[in-house]
Amino acid sequence: MTIHDVMTRRDLMAAAAAGALLATTRAPAQSRDDDLTKLSIADASRRIAAREISPVELTRAYLERIERIDERVNAYITVTAEQALEQARALERELMAGRSRGPLHGIPLGLKDNIDTVGVLTTAASAVYADRVPTKDARVVTLLRDAGAVFLGKLNMHEFAYGATGVVTHYGPVRNPWDLDYIPGGSSSGSAAAVAARMCAAALGTDTAGSIRVPAAYCGVVGLKVTHGLASIRGIVPLSETHDHVGPLARSVTDCALVMNALTGLDPLDPVSIDAPRGDLRDAIGSDVSGLRIGIPRAPFFEELDPEIAAATDAALAMLKDMTRELTDVELPSLDSSAVSNAETYEYHAALAADPARRALYKSWTIDRILSRANVSSVDYIQSRRRLVIARNTVGDLFANVDVLVTPCAMRMPATVEEALRDPRAFPFIRNTMPFNNYGIPAISVPCGFTRAGLPIGLQISGPRLAEARVLALAHAYEQATAWYRREPSLG
């Protein structure tokens, strides 16, 4: 029996007692076959506000599911059951006193394990940080806490977010809930897997080259990366701050918008944070998309695709053509910013890697990659970053005649865990996602089909800088016109 198991069972007993006390203060009890983990955030929020369910009940439902399911998926590194139940009880007391913090009040979320949480182990899935307990919350954790979210625990990931498989981790490979023999994608592997398996209502991930969108596509959930700097990355173990983003994975576009609403805003202590007008992303949900002009960047996004991905994307485009004004082929200029990302990755790890004892704790594939980035010159870095900034400043020109871009999210279907363990470098998972990190523009992955083997396929929608509402509007319209997002894996 692990510490994970002991904590969960002990706190489920405490939750049962709390639930009994709350039973007299809310609407009639739910039926035993009413699985609260199947509720969307929007529906759970309405039922909490109406006193039909309590934050403690909802939290307990997710903890019970983690206890039952996660041994097979391995999505969590740390389950903070006791703290989650304490949060839920406090939030229930606030409701009884007539105070609501908004749509996330009492909603249980998971956090990728490179996002700092005060007093809670935060490892970036590495033995290097196996005993690391932050003394401060990441900025996004503070914002979610203020919004009333309940934190269920920290989610497994590709070590230091430096890969797209989710098998290179000190805590064992994360498995895809749709087929446990397959990877979930990465690096936000546990975040996507936990959402797909209903082990949290939503999760935060990070995205440097596709690390939210690729696992979202492979796990059949929605993953959103907003404009670079719109959400603070302070307090998150970095990979490349010029490319790093933080954002939600959820089971619907609406739920992504609800979580993302809490995360935006200027953080003066974050060197890449931007000051942008704060709108309510919920306003995009259900808005008219009939006038949108869709751009299709054929090269390289549609080249060398898995045939089943190509077929699903073609079907999605045919549907979008009927829903919008027009589809037009466009070109998204290529942009190589590897000198920037390589130098920034090495800069963070240089001191750790210089210590032989620490260096020995990295997974060999991770430390080999990091050390290979040591020789980027200052001239190469500055010149590459200058090109990157200019490209970001001018990418809006591409959207003079189109409003959004649509592409397949991934070019290949996921590898098996066994294949990925043999060689984590062999799979071109991020080719279709990395360009949008280079340009720093918003992009989302939404489910658009399944393979014959039953694995999900993702469609990527992107837009110009600060056009999150436009991207969300089209993503939601497409989602609601299909039934793909309603499917769920058979884990019991």
Image: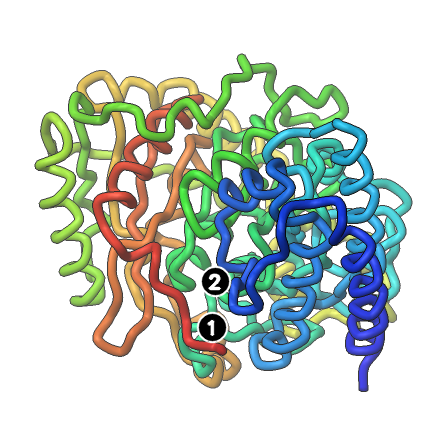
Quadrant of residue 357 in the image? bottom right
Query: Which residue is depicted at the point 44% across and 37% down?
Result: 438
Q: Residues within 10 Å of mark 2 (few under 14, many from 20)?
A: many
Q: Is residue 125 above or below residue 170?
A: above
> How many badges with numbers are in the image?
2
Report the front residue among 104 and 54. 54
Task: Tell me the CA gap for discs 2 and 1.
Answer: 7 Å
> Which label belongs to residue 263?
none
Query: Which residue is depicted at the point 87% across and 49% down?
Result: 134
Q: Quadrant of the N terminus?
A: bottom right
Q: Secondary structure at mark 1?
A: loop
Identity, as a three-letter code, of the amino acid under mark 2: Ala
Q: Residues within 10 Å of mark 1 (few under 14, many from 20)?
A: many
Q: Secondary structure at mark 2?
A: helix
Answer yes or no: is residue 162 visible.
Answer: no
How far from the left and from the top, in percent, is residue 458? 32, 55
> Which label belongs to residue 196?
2
Identity, as a three-letter code, of the amino acid under mark 1: Pro
Q: Earlier in the sequence, mark 2 or mark 1?
A: 1
Q: Is residue 325 above or below residue 194?
A: above
Q: Is residue 176 above or below residue 263?
A: below
Report the front residue among 171 and 372. 171
How far from the left and from the top, in percent, is residue 210? 45, 50
How far from the left and from the top, in percent, is residue 154? 71, 59
Report the front residue among 373 and 259. 259
> Which label belongs to residue 177?
1
Labels 2 & 1 near each other (Cβ < 8 A): yes
Quadrant of residue 274 in the image? top right
Indicate left or right for 205 with 9 as reference.
Answer: left
